[in-house]
Image (spheres, rainbow, N blue to C red):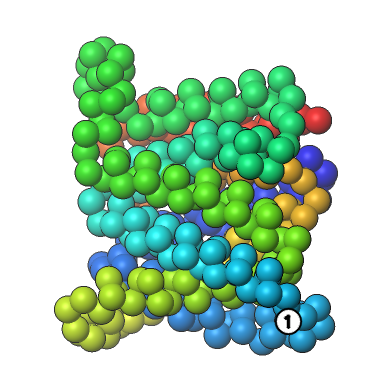
Amino acid sequence: MTTAALFLVLSSAFAHATWNLLLKRSEHKAVFFWSFTVVSFFVFAIPATVFLVIDGLTWQGVLFGLGSASIHGAYGITLSRTYELGDLSAGYPVARGMGVMLIPIFGVSVLGEDISAAAVAGIGLVLAGIYAVQVQPHSLRDLLQPARALALPSSRLALLTGIFIAGYSVWDKAALDHVTPLVLNQFNLTGYLFLMLPFAMHTSGARLRSEWIANGRGIVAAGVLAPLAYIMVLAALTTSQVSYIGPTREVGIVLGAVLGVVFLGEGFGASRIGGALLVLGGVLTLSLAP
């Protein structure tokens, strides 16, 4: 992985964990997500249009963009629901960790990428960290039966979110051969806007108004941070393999666990932060992999 790609991915991780904190702290998660997507769409519309005019767009690019929009929209729905039902310090690591496990598998099987032994070791450390983060250690039995935690609806939704994360990571890597990062991101934002609209407005406009009154600044901040975080990842993907970029991005798991424990007062702080540090060790190993 190049130094520039590593810088982009780590910067993206900070931005990503921060907007996830803002989403978790919101009152109506789907409304908040949809609202900040509206902000994102208009903030990045002009730059995306400039790149579209300069580079053009083929029919293959349109098809890849529509596919990406669909996967991202589904991801937005499941992520919002995960935070409705569960903690940030548990849902965030499980969702991101599931993506870590699947991205290299998809990268090898779909894109024909090769991964080194060092990369496999790094991925193993990341998964060990996810194991530690997602269990609720009331006793030794809980530590030896991590599947007990997966019985929770929030955990199952987090795993489904992770599948979408792996899916859009590999799909978008292929899409970058036909679409520039800013234009592809605009497709993704469109997917959020259309697919999440029924979930954001399933009752009335009252929730939308109350969310803006209570969390207007957070909506605007997330509206900038969320697409910026992913654009940085897309830029990194133009120079490095998705099998390395995807897992390295999960340094944000450390931040997600810490933010949930420190700022939201969520439980099991020692095991979640300890597991997050294992993830960090795996990320550092991946960053050094050839």
Quadrant in which residue 64 is drawn: bottom right
Numbered-mark total: 1
Residue 59 left/right relative to 223: right
Residue 119 left/right relative to 43: right
Residue 27: x and y, percent?
25, 67
Looking at the figure, which quarter contains the N terminus?
top right
Looking at the figure, which quarter contains the C terminus?
top right
Identity of the residue drawn at 43% across and 77% down: 193
Q: Which residue is mark 1?
A: 52
- Front-lying residue, 195 or 30: 195
**Residue 222 visible in the displayed image:** no
Residue 87: x and y, percent?
30, 46
**Amino acid type assigned to the residue bearing label 1 in the image:** Leu
In the image, residue 258 sits, relative to residue 224, either above or below, namely above
- Front-lying residue, 271 or 240: 240
Residue that extends furthest to the front in the rendered view of this protein? 59
Identity of the residue drawn at 37% across and 46% down: 160
Identity of the residue drawn at 21% across and 76% down: 202
In the image, residue 219 sits, relative to residue 255, either above or below, namely below
Quadrant in which residue 124 is drawn: top right
Q: Secondary structure at mark 1?
A: helix
- Front-lying residue, 59 or 95: 59
Residue 163 left/right relative to 152: right
Residue 36: x and y, percent?
44, 75
- Front-lying residue, 276 or 85: 85
Residue 141 left/right relative to 245: left
Quadrant in which residue 245 is drawn: top right
**Residue 252 visible in the displayed image:** yes
Q: Residues within 10 Å of mark 1 (few under 14, many from 20)?
A: some
In the image, residue 103 sits, relative to residue 148, either above or below, namely below
Identity of the residue drawn at 53% across and 46% down: 166
Residue 131: x and y, percent?
41, 26
